[in-house]
Amino acid sequence: MAKNDEQEHELNWKSLFDQRTYSKENLDAWVDSVVQKIWRPVAGGILIAIPAVYVISTFIVGKRFKTAAHIPPEAFEKTMTIRGKVVSVGDSDNFRLYHTPGLGWGWFRHIPKTRKDLQNQTIAVRIAGVDAPESAHFGMPAQPFSAEAKQFLTKMVLNKKVQVQLLSRDQYSRVVAMAYVRRPPFFIKKNVSLEMVKAGLASIYVAKGAQYAGILDELKKYEARAKLLRKGIWSLKNYVSPGDHKSK
């Protein structure tokens, strides 16, 4: 009995196959069924998935630049702005940035904290357009107001979320950039270079290849005001620029 049922089922399957193979109406109906049940959902899924993948990869995940060497030339050509967290301040005019593209940082995306975990994972940034007093190094004594300048920069950017406008890469493999940070109480975006010049803790950088990202006139205005008010470095009787100090 079971054998007869099996044979009958096999014959029914074969007859159905024969009908779909040799009957044009059945074949058309079968094709329509495949399109409706399989191809259209797949095609719709692909059309949804492509923009979704783009949005996720661009705005949620993004491409992270580990170091200055990982930043492509076209990013500098377009003066791209990247965002990140400042994890250390090296001197009075440079810091290290952990690039944080996309969303979710501090929630489900982790920012390393230890020096070991941060090794080869940060971008060295040289603040553009200004020159701040030099700290003691390479046998050279520290310049007056170097400690104050570093303290000012540290308070302004360390452990803060900073926007960095990429301008170039210098001979020390640092990114030369304009840096911006939002400060309380109103969290208005501030240009770090301008703020240091305002405070009398940096002068305009005038060496070959200096870049100002269109704010040279503002830098000149605030430097002149700081000089008039004898703020910071301008309170010195014999001010020596960092460039002249290093050339001694």
Image (cartoon, rainbow, N blue to C red):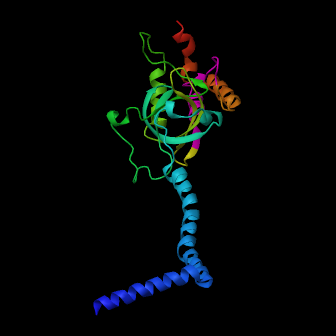
Q: Looking at the image, is 177 positioned above or below residue 54?
A: above
| Image position of 198 (left or right of 70) | right
**Which residue is more in the foreground, 72 or 4?**
4
Rendered residue at 39%/87% (across/down):
9
Q: Position of residue 140 (x, y in %)?
A: 44, 10
Q: Looking at the image, is 161 positioned above or below residue 16?
A: above
Q: Position of residue 142 (x, y in %)?
A: 45, 15
Q: Position of residue 175 (x, y in %)?
A: 54, 29
Q: Looking at the image, is 141 positioned above or below residue 174?
A: above
Identity of the residue furthest to the bottom in this view? 1
| Image position of 203 (left or right of 104) | right
Q: Looking at the image, is 113 positioned above or below residue 5?
A: above
Rendered residue at 44%/23% (across/down):
147
Q: Position of residue 205 (x, y in %)?
A: 61, 21
Identity of the residue furthest to the top in this view? 248
Per the rendered image, the range of residues in magenta is: 189-210
**Which residue is more in the foreground, 190 or 173?**
173
**Which residue is more in the foreground, 35 or 74?**
35
Residue 8's image quarter?
A: bottom left
From where the camera sits, is residue 152 visible?
A: no
Rendered residue at 40%/50% (across/down):
109
Residue 151's image quarter?
A: top left
Residue 192's image quarter?
A: top right
Magenta-span inclusion, residue 168: no
